[in-house]
Image: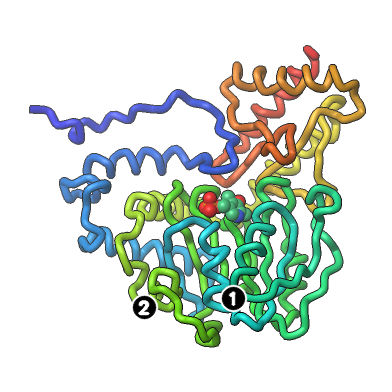
Amino acid sequence: MLRLGDLKIYVCRMKKLNFYSGPAILPEEVLQKAQEAIHDFMGTGLSVLEISHRSKEFVKVMEEARELVKELLQLDHNREVIFMHGGALSQFHVVPMNLLNEKETASYFDTGTWAHGAQEEAKLFGTVHIACSSKDKNYTYIPRQYTIAPNSKYLHITSNNTIYGTQLSTQYISDLKSLTNPLVCDMSSDIFSRQLNFNQFDLIYAGAQKNMGPAGTTLVVVNKEIFGSVSRSIPRMLDYRQHIAKESMLNTPSVFSVYVSYLTLQWIKKCGLDTLEEQNNRKAATLYGAIDSSQIFKGTVERDSRSKMNVCFVVNPDLAETQRAKLEDGFIQFCKNQNIIGIQGHRSVGGFRASIYNAMPESGVDKLIAVMREFERKA
Ligand SMILES: *Cc1c(COP(=O)(O)O)cnc(C)c1O
């Protein structure tokens, strides 16, 4: 009898260009390898969906995934890599639970919905000082000025604000380094998109589903030396030191998500972080260039704060209201007809957002631009 797994036929998906913000596009070769592993995981004759997380094959995947992160981010020996559950949102409370005593203060950048959510959770554990906020202009810029509270236990930043399309530049982040605080960063939507000195952070977290893999696992990079100063008892599953000690196997990890993230990390290594960064720079530059030269579209973010991952734009607000509404609906539909999906802006911003993570090829961005131009010609 013929077993499905014996047939190396790849059922190619109906090709759509996926500009969703997350879960987001993954490299085609990663999808193909994941598909193979669903039928036969590394020659075990078992599916990756049914394999034991204690099997030597998966333990090796977990080890190698953590090693790959260390290698790609060029981490020093103080940094540990762990995979946790609960998404970036859980880190909003796990971070203060592990680092902030009740009578202590932590400083937070208020640069968007997620950054704001992180502060709200931290307030459950200690005092939050808002170092800066761009809420006054609906989070369309990164503030140049900020104040860190004296004796601040740590500083929390969000390197890329996925919903509003703003990003802290590499220079901006390295200037923060001169501060004495431990630096904590929600890097969910731009990790592995550019080269940085990752050792300047004491804690980095990222939900996998933007630029690293499918939803289900959360990457955490920590400086082991920042723990041990909180007096509260921490439940085991929420204690970073426990996850470090058990090498991300404190309980059953998200096996499939970790495996597909591992495949993506291998792909990132093959491409090279430097090459991906150059490509991301080019993609963002061409797309913003097209928006800036358009008569009907307009970017929503101040130029020096623009994200290279999430490009937000609207129908030019100078146009008449009735015309705008028509163009907005029309463009989404026009894109759909061209197999372009996921460009609707977040409901708090409106308009459009094109998420152009690592796996989005330059040709995909070129296609979007061609469709924008064609729409404009016909409008
Ligand atoms: C998507 C996102 C989150 C939320 O992530 P979950 O994994 O769904 O909890 C938090 N922060 C940023 C910057 C994000 O882009």
Q: Within 10 angstroms of label 1, few (less than 14), some, or many (20 or more) residues?
A: many
Which residue position holds label 1?
Answer: 202
Q: Is residue 69 above or below residue 256?
A: below
Q: How far across and down, in percent of the image, does residue 104 sit?
A: 66, 82
Left or right relative to 70: residue 243? left
- Quadrant of the frame with the N terminus: top left
Question: In front here: 75 or 113?
Answer: 113
Q: Would residue 324 be seen by someone viewing this image from the given angle?
A: yes
Q: How far across and down, in percent of the image, does residue 283 sit?
A: 68, 41
Q: Within 10 angstroms of label 2, few (less than 14), some, or many (20 or more) residues?
A: few
Q: Is residue 211 above or below residue 204?
A: above
Secondary structure state at the residue bearing disc 2: helix
Q: How far across and down, in percent of the image, does residue 50 sit?
A: 22, 48
Residue at image location 50% in from the left, 86% down from the top: 228
How far separated are the C-alphas under marks 2 and 1?
Answer: 18 Å
Which residue position holds label 2?
Answer: 245
Left or right relative to 375: residue 274? left
Hey, which quadrant is residue 81 in on the image?
A: bottom left
Q: Earlier in the sequence, mark 2 or mark 1?
A: 1
Direction top: furthest residue: 378
Question: In front here: 215 or 198?
Answer: 215
- Quadrant of the frame with the C terminus: top right
Question: In front here: 327 or 322?
Answer: 322
Q: Amino acid at mark 2?
A: Ala
